[in-house]
Each structure stands twice: as structure tokens, then as C-alpha cells.
Image (cartoon, rainbow, N blue to C red):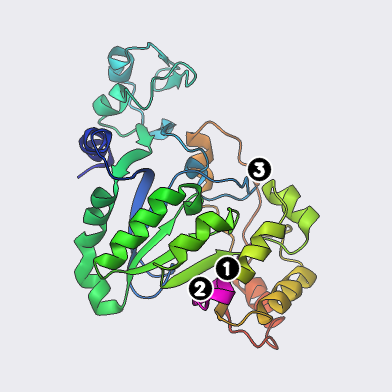
Amino acid sequence: MTLRKRFQLYAPKAAQATEPVGLVSDFQRFSIHDGPGIRTIVFLKGCPLRCQWCQNPEDILPRPELLYIRNNCIGCGKCLEACPARCITADGPRGVAIDKAACRLPECGACQAVCYANAITICGRHLTVDEVLEEVELDREFYDRSGGGVTFSGGEPFAQPRFLLALARAAKARGLDTAVETSGCADWEAMLPVMAHLDTVLYDVKHMDPQTHRRLTGVDNARILDNLRRVDALGLPIRVRVPLVPGLNDAPENLRRTAAFVAGLSHVAALDLLPYHRMGEPKWGQLEKDYPLRGVSPHAREEVVALAALLEDSPVRVTIGG
């Protein structure tokens, strides 16, 4: 089933639902780096951070959005005819321009329905808890065999705290292993109830210096580090993850400070260094946004290995890539 058909099928159900409804951007199957075993990742939209290297920019805003993939466009003109707001115009022999201010999402979506080339896609579907978990449970056999389960990610999943709590509680009731991937930038009162229904917490630490953290992400790190201490006090298994971005947070001093902070916690299973990649860069263009790190090249493998070696004396296990 295509994403386009899913949007059309799921939106009416969600509109009639009495249970919590959330805004989901995508499902990623057969993940092996976001918690134990083989997992399905559920991406929730909305994030309070504005990380310069964000690999999921489509999950920043808490509303459905149009993504336009110009290279897919065949210039058929079907979207121009279908759009009731007339916010799509021709832009060259094989392309269109979209006035997103005039777009009637989420009520419409007519352009995506007729775009069989998948040049226009809608990112963000309002789904019920049951609809999300029905999708997750399609791969139940793989979870059972590998010790896997479901990981809630984003964006920032705690940006939808009521929906996340309902998802985590229902997933545990179905016997699923649950994990959350979070920046920790949320109110602790919203985070705490969810923790009772989680098996693993994947916790991002971007930078240890508060001013640099603010420059790179738009917020300082005081609440983030405080919440990490609170999660640790609950006794949940934690994997601390550092997105390793060239020239931004890969200085040896920052990595040593991160490792020292993590060593002061009691329930961290590993400190994962996640090498920077550029696979999310095209999505910035599809959203008609400028990628802040355009032209930044990923580390060579040897460079990442050398940075990890700086932390070999840490009492916490250090991994590359999780």
C-alpha cells in the first residue's frame, strides 16, 4: 500500500476516533540500529529543536506538509487541474511551483491523489493508536525472533505526549518491546508517565556546552541533561547517542566531557557515536528550505575510529553507529 493511499484511508478513521489521535509522518521497517533486535520505527511530527544537521526536517513542524520532488515530476499537469485552491502553477517544461501559504492541507490533498509519479507527497497523517499498532504488528514475527519491537521517534516524540503515552501503554499491553528516541527537550511531567511503559531509552546528547548547544539547536542543554539524570534515576536501560557532526561537536574536549557526564550515570548501556551523513539533505529541498550544512562532508571512517579511541578509557562502552 502506498503512502498516498494510506493517507486517504487513515484520515477519515482518525477524524471519527474517540481515542487519542497523533500526527505520524512515516514508518520505517527492519531497523537494527534503534533499539534491540529488528524494529519498526514510528516517526511522530513536531520538534522543539532546530538542529542544523537535522536528518528529518519533515518532522520539525507539527502539521501535515507537502514535499515536492522535482526530479520525479513529469509535467503532466494533473495536479494543476486537481487543486481546488489553484495554488499550483507550471514552472518550466517539467515542474511546478506550489504556493504553500494558499494550500488547504490537511483538508485537501487532491494534488497527491493524482500524482502517480510521486512528485508531490503529503508528510503527516492523523492516525489512531490502533491504526499505528496495526501497522507495527505486521512484522510481529521478526520482533519475536530477534528480540525487537517498536521505537517511537521523530521529530521529538514527547512533543505529542498524550499520544505517545497512549501508544506506549497499548504497545506494552500487546506484548511489544518498546523504545523511544528522544532529545530530552520536554517537560519532565510529560516524560515521566511514558517511562513506565518503555524498555529502552535512546537519548541524544548534541553538545555539552550550553551556549554552543543553543547555537547549534536553538535551545540550551540544561533541561536536556537534567532530564537525562532523571531517566537514569528510574533505572531504565539507556543508550546515549551523539550525532557526530564535522566541525560542530566533534572536538575531543566535547567528546571527553560527554563521556565523563555519561560515566556519572548508573544505567547507561553504551555511548553511541553516530557518524554524520547527508541522506536527509534532499528532504530540505523537497520542503523548499535551505540545508544549513550544505557542502559539509562526512568524516572518513578512520577519523571516526580515531575519535572513538579518545574515549577508550571511559568506563562506559563506546560504539560507532549504535
Q: Are circles 2 and 1 on residues that touch, CB within 8 Å?
A: yes
Query: Which residue does the numbered mark 2 point to in the structure image?
Result: 322
Query: Which residue does the numbered mark 1 point to in the structure image?
Result: 241
- Marks 3 and 1 sit apart, C-alpha to C-alpha, by 22 Å
188 vs 174, left or right, is right
Label 2 residue SS:
loop
- Marks 2 and 3 sit apart, C-alpha to C-alpha, by 25 Å
Kind of residue at badge 2: Gly
Kind of residue at badge 1: Arg
Kind of residue at badge 3: Pro
Residue at x 48% of width, y 44% of height: 59
Residue 69 magenta-drawn? no
**Towards the viewer: 31 or 235:** 235
Residue 137 image position (x, y, % from top left): 22, 61
Considering only order in the chain, which callout, 1 or 3, is on the residue closer to the N terminus?
1
Label 3 residue SS:
loop
- Marks 2 and 1 sit apart, C-alpha to C-alpha, by 8 Å
Residue 163 image position (x, y, % from top left): 39, 49
Q: Which residues are magenta?
A: 231-244
Residue at x 33% of width, y 39% of height: 126
Eye-nearest disc, 2 or 1 = 1
Considering only order in the chain, which callout, 3 or 2, is on the residue closer to the N terminus?
3
Label 1 residue SS:
strand
Query: Measured along the vertical axis of the image, is residue 43 above or below residue 193?
Result: above
Query: Which residue does the numbered mark 3 point to in the structure image?
Result: 292
